[in-house]
Image (cartoon, coloured by chain):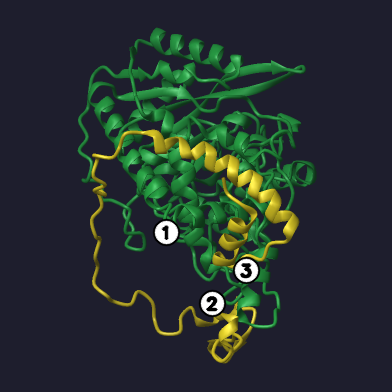
Amino acid sequence: MIDLKKLTIKSAHEHLINKDFSVHELVQEYLNVIKEKNSDINAYLEVYDDVMAQADVAQKIIDSGKAGMLCGIPIALKDNILVTGKKATSASKILEGYVAPYDATVVSKLKTENLVFLGRTNMDEFAMGGSTENSAFGVTKNPIDTSRVAGGSSGGSAAAVSMDGALGALGSDTGGSVREPAAFCGVVGLKPTYGGVSRHGLMAMGSSLDVIGPITKTVTDSEIMYNAIAGLDSFDSTTYPSTLYPHTKKEKLVLGVPYHILDQEGINQSVRDNFTESIKKLEELGYEIRDIRLPNIGYSLAVYYILMPAEVSSNLARFDGVKYGLHLEGDNLLQDYLKTRAKGFGPEVRRRILIGTYVLSTGYYDAYYNKANILREMISEEFNKAFKEVDCIVMPTTPMPSFKIGEKAHDPLSMYLADVFTVPANIVGIPAISIPSGVTSVGGVDLPLGIQLMSSHDREDTLFEISKKFLGEK
Amino acid sequence: MITTQDIQHLASLARIELGEAEAQHLTTEIDSILGYVGQIKATGTENVPHVPALHNVMRDDIPTNTAGQYTEALLDNAPSREGDYLKVKKILGNSDDII
């Protein structure tokens, strides 16, 4: 028996190299957990049928002595990332039966490391949601308390890691979809810099916001996975060369806390208390804490819920029942479109497409879309200014711990408010990480809480450094 | 205040068929969401020019794959095909089909 609870990517790698166990044995342990728990948790939509064949390839590399850090490591992929010959549906009925014709860049990069892809994980349909309740294939339960949501939209990926059903997973983050489920499930979630990781082969949601990021148990593992997937890619023109953002090494890091954002309503007391404790802990670790002001950050959520649906409405125009997936017959081509898109898209996707269509329509474009773009630049400017003074900005990840399944399902606006602390990083394009910062006891269950660290563009190294110190990782 | 007619119009633009009950339901929800995001209308950004900090990223137009490399895999996903073409219903002829 391998103790999966304590296992990390780093330690598993050492065990594999030392021949304490084989890739086959390691992978089998994970398959056993998935078999035992997945029918209840619903983290995975599919476990691939070639997992052991992948394990055999990885073992040969290890035996040859040429294994890298990720060789033979079993991980999970969010259902919106393409793997040649495998199904990918974005948890939507409209992509029923879709088989990916090519590998996403992140997948081809990980394939060269010979890690083992266990399967594809559940998510909110087309990554729209914060609870995985918008999946066409049922909710993903939180492994820590199965009456609660795993978060979303990368809820399946976070739950897979949290339930010891994978050593790591990839998710995508448009407004918090990696960080929020990571916080709810007590694991580490990284949203890299916009353009830091190629989106080639990721199904697009909000193209000026989307980024792929790892979900792991430790910060060290997060860094290992990030290094493996990051970098320039000719298939995604928003990726940047490592020379784009100059790095200056500082001796003493200063952390900024925009305390004024905690003044707003709707923030759970346990989140406030835990945040205060976390800041105290950072101070005790020797960091200087500075109170900073980001005057327009309060508009981030409104800006996000204008720009994102606008981009959604155009990105999802491609799903028309002609090129792939579901097709419903009407009397003519227009009826085919109307019926296919009505039946294929779930309620939240339809809602966002309509909002996006509205804010982009004549007469409203200036009042909503253009205005949101101007505010986006103002908010970005405020962050850039703040980063001249501080190296890292600290906020809670979410305003509340994981909520009950069904609690917010009928009130889309209250669900959107869960993204209040995570959307600014997407709007500005900076990297942000959510790390476990403690628990709050609700109904006899210790629910995880997370804090979020943000740094300037391409300064993931700062996030890793501070996060490791906070969690006591060597 | 957005109306059910507005929602039906947006749905037809977005090529999504909506039933009457769903249209009414969406009217209430979308009205409340637009109320929330509409808070930005009160901000004083009138004198701020919108200059996107974007630039074009160009590359030479050289094929990155060989001819036909992905044809089968792509067309296999199509609900309806004829040879190497996607098959759709005819789009010309009935002017009242277009809204």
Residue A189, image x, y percentages? 51, 35
Residues A134 and B14: in front is B14
Q: Residue at x 38, y 43 (%)?
A: A372
Q: Residue at x 43, y 24 (%)?
A: A467
Q: Is residue A237 above or below residue A430?
A: below
C-alpha separation, residue under disc 1 versus residue under disc 3: 35 Å
Q: Identify the mark at residue A362; answer none if there is no mark.
A: 1
Q: Chain of mark 2?
A: B
Q: Identify the mark at residue A467; answer none if there is no mark.
A: none
Amino acid at pointer 3: Tyr
Amino acid at pointer 1: Thr
Q: Is residue A383 left or right of residue B91?
A: left
Tag 1 and tag 3 share a subunit: yes
Residues A430 and B38: in front is B38
Q: Is residue B9 left or right of residue B66?
A: right
Q: Is residue A210 visible?
A: no
The colour one sees for chain B in the rendered image is yellow
Residue labelled with disc 2: B74
Q: Chain of mark 1?
A: A
Kindly state the secondary structure of the residue where label 3 is placed. Answer: loop
Q: Identify the mark at residue A98; answer none if there is no mark.
A: 3
Specify the chain shown as green.
A
Q: Is residue B72 above or below residue A73?
A: below
